[in-house]
């Protein structure tokens, strides 16, 4: 299972999101690349099922 950071360079500042196994993707979550890298590492370490991907990202945005 591999969650990874995706970049959106169409705006300034650059926005970062996450791609999940199974084709799930949520873009423009944060402008902080290190924050997104940490979230991706955590999701990979915990082997989070992609079924919960959108809920986890929404919770992350609210925090």
Image (cartoon, rainbow, N blue to C red):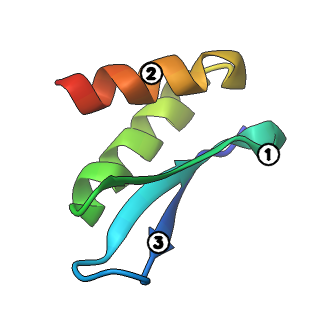
Q: Position of residue 1 (x, y in %)?
A: 72, 37
16 relative to 63, above or below: below
Q: Position of residue 51 (x, y in %)?
A: 70, 17
Residue drawn at point x = 79 percent, y = 45 percent: 23
Give the mark nearer the N terminus: 1 vs 3.
Answer: 3
45 relative to 20, above or below: above
Name the residue carrying label 3. 7
Residue drawn at point x = 69 percent, y = 25 percent: 50
Q: Position of residue 37 (x, y in %)?
A: 37, 54
Q: Quadrant of the C terminus?
A: top left
Location of residue 21 (image quadrant): top right
Give the mark nearer the N terminus: 1 vs 2.
Answer: 1
User: Residue 23: which numbered mark, if any?
Assistant: 1
Q: Please indicate whether residue 46 sits to the left or right of residue 19 in the image.
A: left
Crowding at label 3, few (<14), some or many (≥20) Cα neighbours within 10 Å? some
Q: Please indicate whether residue 58 sits to the left or right of residue 4 in the image.
A: left
Which residue is at the front of the view, 51 or 11? 11
- Tell me the element at label 2: helix
Crowding at label 2, few (<14), some or many (≥20) Cα neighbours within 10 Å? some
Give the mark nearer the N terminus: 2 vs 3.
Answer: 3
Gap in angstroms between the C-alphas marked 1 and 2: 16 Å
- Tell me the element at label 1: helix
Residue drawn at point x = 39 percent, y = 25 percent: 58
Name the residue carrying label 2. 56
How many numbered callouts? Answer: 3
Gap in angstroms between the C-alphas marked 2 and 3: 19 Å
- Tell me the element at label 3: strand
37 relative to 40, above or below: below
Q: Please indicate whether residue 40 sits to the left or right of residue 11 in the image.
A: right
Q: Are marks 1 and 2 in contact (CB under 8 Å)?
A: no
Gap in angstroms between the C-alphas marked 1 and 3: 16 Å
Q: Position of residue 8 (x, y in %)?
A: 46, 74
């Amino acid at each position: 299972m591999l969650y990874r950071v995706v970049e959106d360079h169409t705006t300034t500042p650059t926005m970062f999101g996450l791609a999940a196994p199974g084709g799930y993707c949520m873009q423009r979550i944060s402008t902080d690349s290190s924050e997104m890298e940490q979230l991706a590492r955590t999701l990979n370490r915990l082997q989070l099922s992609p079924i919960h991907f959108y809920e986890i990202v929404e919770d992350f945005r609210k925090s």
